[in-house]
Image (cartoon, rainbow, N blue to C red):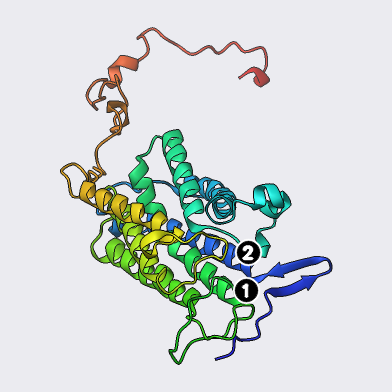
Amino acid sequence: MPFPNFDPVLIHLGPIAIRWYAIAYIAGILLGWRYGVWLTRDAKLWRGSRPTLDERQIDDLVLWLTLAILVGGRLGSILFYNTSVIWTDPLEIFQPWHGGMSFHGAFLAVTGVIVWFAWRNKVDMLRLGDLVAPCVPFGLFFGRIANFINGELWGRPTTLPWGIIFPNAGPEPRHPSELYEAGLEGLALFIILRIATHHLKWLPRRGAITGLFVAFYGLFRIALENVREPDRNMPHFPFGLTMGIMLSIPMVAVGLWVLWLSRQPGALAPEMIEDEPLDPSQDGTPPDVPELHADTFSATDYAPPADYAPPTDYADESQR
């Protein structure tokens, strides 16, 4: 099957080229942002507990996450897969549109932002991760679709009828591994996390959603690395390992550990008590104010003296 004739540039605006790759990142971030806000608005998902962040805090967090995705993804690609460009062509580091964004690099940078943001806002790090994790599959899905449009990160040779002959990948049909990744890392992972948030109601359980995301992403990536062509400039690792597999194995271990933590006593967030006042002065009764009764005063308390007579010697009528 020949590769579809996709143009990686959506539209040219003079000297500016709007690429599908950029649109994929923008769409993933915007949809993930609004999905996170929607999760906090659905009180049923939190089972009476307080949502991790409010909408204003989510807006603030998205800006930092966007920066982490872009910087971490690019630096991860250079450090994990193409270290030689640091001294052979350092300007290539600043040209991500040529290809080269690493999920694992972005994941580490996003984790750092979550730790810092949780500390700054005095919220639990794992509970913050539980809010962010369900929003990530949007970006993974669109990012892999953009990889396919760019004709990059293709799979290994295959004889299956849906094998695709990618440009610059030789005459052999290959697995469309980008589409496999979009299906597993994007759609399947979203469904798994959706079941956890909406059917199992795990958002109040500290670390449960984070553990599911990290463990399942690692498992999916390890499986897909077996049909994905290793990067050409990477060395041959023993036992059929690839850089993607070696970076994903720790994710599975950490994800399972966090899932175990989520089942421990005390992991479930306490319910909010709606009618409990924040302090005694907010219970609706003004402090130190005595109650007034109808019989406290009588009409005789304000009666004028018996010899009182109003004055009648005004100088003129205007003074009355």
Residues 205 and 298: in front is 205
Q: Amino acid at mark 1?
A: Asn
In the rendered image, the residue lying farthest to the right is 14
Q: Is residue 15 above or below residue 88?
A: below
Residue 205 visible to an observer of this rendering: no
Pointer 1 with pointer 2, Cβ within 8 A: yes
Residues 291 and 285: in front is 285
Q: Amino acid at mark 2?
A: Gly
The residue positioned 39% from the left and 62% from the top of the image is 241
Q: Is residue 27 above or below residue 319?
A: below
Q: Whole-percent x and y of residue 209?
A: 31, 56
- Which comes sooner in the sequence, label 1 or label 2? 2
Residues 22 and 179: in front is 179
Tag shown at residue 79: none
Badge 2 element = loop
Q: Whole-percent x and y of residue 215?
A: 31, 58
Residue identified by numbered label 1: 150
Judge the density around disc 2: few (<14), some (14-19), many (≥20) Cα neighbours within 10 Å: some
Residue 183 visible to an observer of this rendering: yes
Q: Quadrant of the C terminus?
A: top right
Q: Is residue 65 above or below residue 193?
A: above
Badge 1 element = helix
The residue positioned 59% from the left and 86% from the top of the image is 171
Residue identified by numbered label 2: 99
In the image, taking residue 35 as reference, residue 317 lies left or right, namely right
Quarter of image, res 26: bottom right
